[in-house]
Amino acid sequence: MPEQVAIPDFSHEANLIASGLAIVAGVDEVGRGPLAGPVTAAAVVLDPDCIPDGLADSKMLTAERRLELATVLEGCAEIALGWASVEEIDEINIRNAAFLAMCRAVDALPRRARHALIDGNACPPGLCCPATPIVKGDGLCVSIAAASIVAKVARDRVMIELDASFPGYGWATNVGYATVEHRRALQHLGVTPHHRRSFGLVHQMLCD
């Protein structure tokens, strides 16, 4: 049987809004695993009266559907992006860099969030508002699902642009992950400034 796609709902946000916390942001990040490129986070505050149909974990959607939903969200939700660079990833490690990107996304929202719903099992230290972690939140919480879509679309665009400047690594399709194509290109073309030198495969190549 085909895998059932989880359908997130607005219950987490509704409970917080009912308690007086009017601005609730869903927060998610993409790009922890790739060998190259930044890590990207998004914060999304949905309008309870204008929630697009079809919001789900970005990994469960096609690229075309993600782009459609991201475009719709731009017109009906408050959205902000946060980034952590390859240099920051190498300096503070990928987990802390992902937390940093999340904090930057929440900080960049047009209005200050009263509460954040964070995908995962921990909240970023230094977040500008109280927060609740939700394990597998992108499949449970519609604001987090929206954030996962926005972050994925934004990061994919960056990797497509980088692919044009550094052809051969396949970043337009593998978005920096360690595919066979990417690993072969590393062996033949070498390490670029956009590779994460703290990641084992890249670090090993630099040390050989």
Image (cartoon, rainbow, N blue to C red):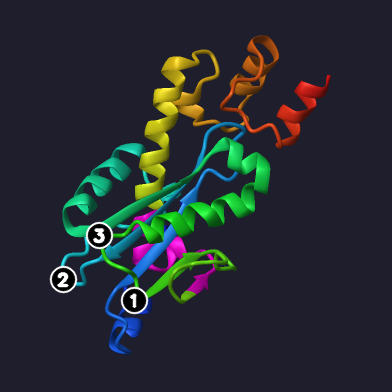
Name the residue at 48% across, 66% down: 118
- Which residue lies at the image location 46% right of the left edge and 45% below the top edge? 83
Mark 1 vs mark 2, CA separation in Å = 13 Å
Residue 7 visible at all: no
Image vertical order of residue 70 relative to residue 25, above or below: above
Real-space Cα separation, disc 2 to disc 3, in angstroms: 13 Å
Mark sitting earlier along the chain (1/2):
1
Q: Is residue 96 above or below residue 201?
A: below
Q: Is residue 171 left or right of residue 35?
A: left
Which residue corresponds to the image point at 34% horizontal and 64% vertical from the top-left?
A: 143
**Residue on which the image places disc 1:** 13
How many C-alpha atoms fall within 10 Å of the one at disc 3: few (<14), some, or many (≥20)?
some
Look at the picture and state if 185 lies above or below 105.
above
Q: Amino acid at mark 1?
A: Glu
Residue 206 image point, x, y percent: 76, 22
Determine the CA span between mark 1 and mark 3: 14 Å
Front one among 126 and 27: 126
- Tell me if label 1 and label 3 are in contact, CB under 8 Å: no
Which residue position holds label 3?
78
Side of 101 where 48 appears, left or right: left
Query: The residue tagged with tag 2: helix, strand or loop?
Result: loop
Q: Which residue in the structure is indicated by mark 2?
A: 49
Q: Is residue 164 magenta?
A: no
Magenta residues (range): 132-147
> Going by the picture, which residue comes out furthest to the right?
208
| Disc 1 and disc 2 in contact, CB within 8 angstroms | no
Please report whichever mark, 1 or 3, sits nearer to the chain's N-terminal start.
Answer: 1
Residue 179 falls in which quadrant of the image?
top right
